Image: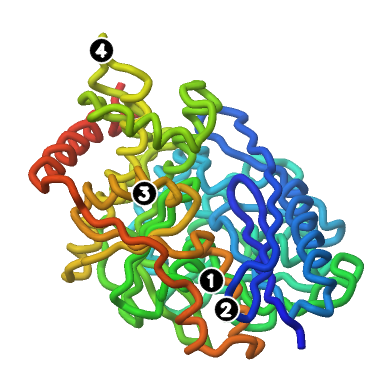
Amino acid sequence: MRKYIIAIDAGTTGNRAVAFSKEGRIASSFYYEFSSIYPKPGWVEQDPLDIWRTTKMALVKVIEDVGGPENVNAIGITNQRETTILWDRKTGKPLYNAIVWQCRRTAEICKSLYPYRKIIKEKTGLFLDPYFSATKIKWLIENVEDVKKTVIKGDALFGTVDTWLLWNLTRGKAHSTDSSNASRTMLFNINTLKYDEELLRIFNIPAYLLPEVKDSNTLFGYTNPGITGKTIPITGILGDQQAALFAQGGWNGEIVKNTYGTGLFVVASTGKEKPETKNLINTIAFCIEGKATYAIEGSVFSAGSILQWLKDNLGIIQTIEESGKLANSVYSNGDIYFVPALTGLGAPYWDSDARGLLIGLTRSTKREHIVRAALESIAFQARDVIEEIKLITKRKVHALRVDGGASKNDFLMQLQADILNMRIERAENIESTSLGVAEMAGLSTGFWSFDCVKDLNPIERVFAPSMDSQKSEILYQKWKKAVKRSLKWVSDL
């Protein structure tokens, strides 16, 4: 019997392959980072060949580590979502760098399409924002000569990172995605579960570019034996946040999860319902047997990337791990507030013209106060989204399930419990994105049953609120005041 499911977890800063045993334990894991490119302020790109190279390296290492492909039952792919790649179907070569989900270069395109914003929201559940894929595709076609020529010839293909990896793993035999990723393109109608002809006309994007959309737990193709030694079925694809939601019990309408990664992603399952949302997005959590499970999501652009910025750009911290210790060494934030609008603000503000702000500095300010303010900004942003979820769903949220790299920071998790005044439940496996898509792939092959996957990710630790609720509320209201100062910074001249 084949003993393992392998998850490919294609993140924003690096790619990981993880082998899971029948018990849901990690048997092997390899991770390789790759670089981002910043050609202009607010622009973020990556080399698609780096994305593929690091993925291949991690996958091959894990397969070797578990004794070869004969021990691998199936592969699942989870990925950074809206990141946009166009390539030549004949050569397989990228036509331009990947435009990353964080990139804000299409803000002007969004403004030009403003009259269509209501149609777009009704059909896709998304806001007209540079975050999503459609305006990135439009920009590439209109501004990159190689892209324009290849599109006209009919030889261009589009994909988010999952589709790009699938294409390469199968050596061009599969050009597909799942509905959770398709729902982030701004071209996919989440009501009909199909690409929408009116949206394609609005963005002037030819339909032939787009990958076939399949259920999240279906056979997408087989790996090329030249890559993996023998063919291995690829039987699950999910966007990273949907995968984390699934691992955290996202089939349950009571669950709200938050993943602390490069960004911050608070997602609540809504089952078959698509509640009207003013400041959050509706999205597809996953599709099984042609039936969609929906979710509402607050996507915050800067979370773990804030700490990376403090380390790499400012040199305030030497390692990300020391941030909690430094923040805990001071009694309070010293009345310092940091609004991390480094690439604009996402949910619930959706302001691409907002910019980062550090306010309240005095002669007594120390770097420890700034680090604490940075960590507090992560917790405040999560509360912003949770408050919206409460309004939309009309239900109380008693606990928040958390995962992702920054959830390892005990100081941040306790702070999050205090700011929210609710229980924080940290998963035993904080790499829930990997586990979620592994579960999806395993359900497809019968490696796991649905009842079995419910028990694969128990709670490791609970953080209960310890701060006086009145103090917490004062801190939060001052945060809201600081946010107002950062809004429309670029446009209000």
**CB atoms of marks 3 and 4 within 8 Å:** no
Check residue 114 in the rendering and tell me which mark sits there, or answer none.
Answer: 3
Q: Indicate the position of residue 309 as horizontal and vertical percent values.
A: 49, 30
- Do labels 1 and 4 touch, CB within 8 Å? no
- N-terminal of the pair, mark 1 or mark 4, is 4
Residue under label 4: 364
Give percent across and percent down for residue 70: 84, 79
Viewer-nearest of labels 1 and 4?
Answer: 4
Q: Which mark is residue 428?
A: none
Kindly identify the amino acid type of the residue bearing the numbered disc 2.
Met
Q: Secondary structure at mark 4?
A: loop
**Does the residue at mark 1 contact the one at mark 2 (Cβ under 8 Å)?**
yes
Marked residue nearer the N-terminal end (4 or 2): 4
The residues bearing labels 1 and 3 have C-alpha atoms spaced at a distance of 36 Å
Asked whether residue 35 is in view, the answer is yes
Q: Residue at coordinates 40% horizontally, 37% vertically from top-left? A: 324
Q: Which residue is mark 2?
A: 440
